[in-house]
Structure formats: C-alpha cells, structure tokens
Image: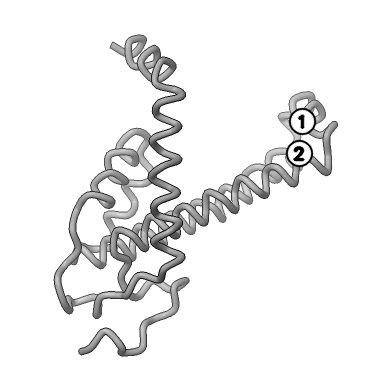
Amino acid sequence: MSQNAIQPPVLSLQGRFNRLTFLGWNCLLLITNLLMGLIFISFMPNTIDAIFRNANSFIVQAVFIIPNIIFFTFILLFSIKRLHDINLTAWLAFLELIPFVNLLFFIFLVCMPGTEGDNKYGIPRATQTWESVLAVIFILLLVIILVLFSNALLGILSLSL
C-alpha cells in the first residue's frame, strides 16, 4: 500500500499515529481542555466558591466528571492509535487507568519508534504540518512545566520515599 491510500478518520479506533501526530493531537486536547476551563471560570467567576461549598452535590460532581470522561476517551483513542503504530494491541491503552503507570506509559508511547511501513493495523499516517507544530509546542510546554515545578516535584518525590 502507498502513503496516499485513504486513511481511516482520526476519531476512529482504526489507523495509526506516529510520535509527532500523537504529541500534536495530545497538545490540541490539552489546549482545548485549558480553554474550556478558562471559559468556564471567566463566565462564572463566583462558581469556584459555589463548587467548593457544594462539593457533594450530584450536579457539581457531574459538571466535573462528564468533561473528564470525554477528555479521557480522547486520551485512550490517541493511545490506541499510537499502540497500533508500534504494532501492539489496543488493550494496553488501559494502562492509562493506573496512576503513575500512565506517566511511564505516555513516555513509552512518545519514545518507542513505530513500525516501518505497513503493519497489521494499516499503513503509516503522514504527519500534517500543524500536528508537527503542536508537537513541538507540547514538548516545550512539558519542559517549561518541569523547570517551573521541579522543586515541587522533588518535594513530592522526597515525601514518598
């Protein structure tokens, strides 16, 4: 098969994501999530106080749980497509459910090279330019976050040891 063959839709469980595409779509998801949070806070400035006062309310919990389920669904989808590129089963994506293991799993997905050429999950997907740009932005954001919060991260790690 050639690179020009018809690719499955991005939002399907079929197909493959190479490393740059995976990072680009994760960056798009992060930006979308942050923008939704900023819009939520800016249009409802008194809501944060109300949320803390009514934390046990079903409606308050639903307001937070439903977007997180949607967010996590996309994380699983992108991980499945990345696993397909590595020629591994999609069932491994459920490692995303295990705290701390999910961080190691993400690093694995970013670092592990994909299968050259066709594999049992299809042909390689060409990375779009905007996906590459977002991938670079995502990497830069991760480096900035690690630098800014390195002391806090070291403090957390020292407490757990």
Which residue occupies 63% across, 50% down? 66
Q: Looking at this rendering, what residue extends furthest in the left direction?
A: 116
Q: How far apart are marks 2 and 1 (CA)?
A: 7 Å
Q: Tell me if label 2 and label 1 are in contact, CB under 8 Å.
A: yes
Res 52 → quadrant: top right
**Element marked by disc 2:** helix
Res 2 → quadrant: bottom left
Q: Tell me: 146 left or right of 87.
A: right
Three-letter amino acid code of the residue under disc 2 = Ile
Q: Does residue 89 lie above or below 32 as drawn?
A: below
Q: Mark 1 points at which residue?
A: 48
Res 88 → quadrant: bottom left
Which residue occupies 19% across, 53% down? 112
Q: Does residue 79 lie above or below 57 as drawn?
A: below
Front-lying residue, 47 or 69: 47
Q: Does residue 107 lie above or below 112 as drawn?
A: above
Q: Tell me: 12 left or right of 20.
A: right
In the image, which is nearer the foreground, mark 2 or mark 1?
2
Q: Does residue 27 lie above or below 150 as drawn?
A: below
Q: Where is residue 37 in the image (x, y as percent from the top left)?
A: 67, 43
Q: Mark 2 points at which residue?
A: 41
Q: Where is residue 91 in the image (x, y as percent from the top left)?
A: 28, 59
Which residue occupies 31% across, 75% down? 125
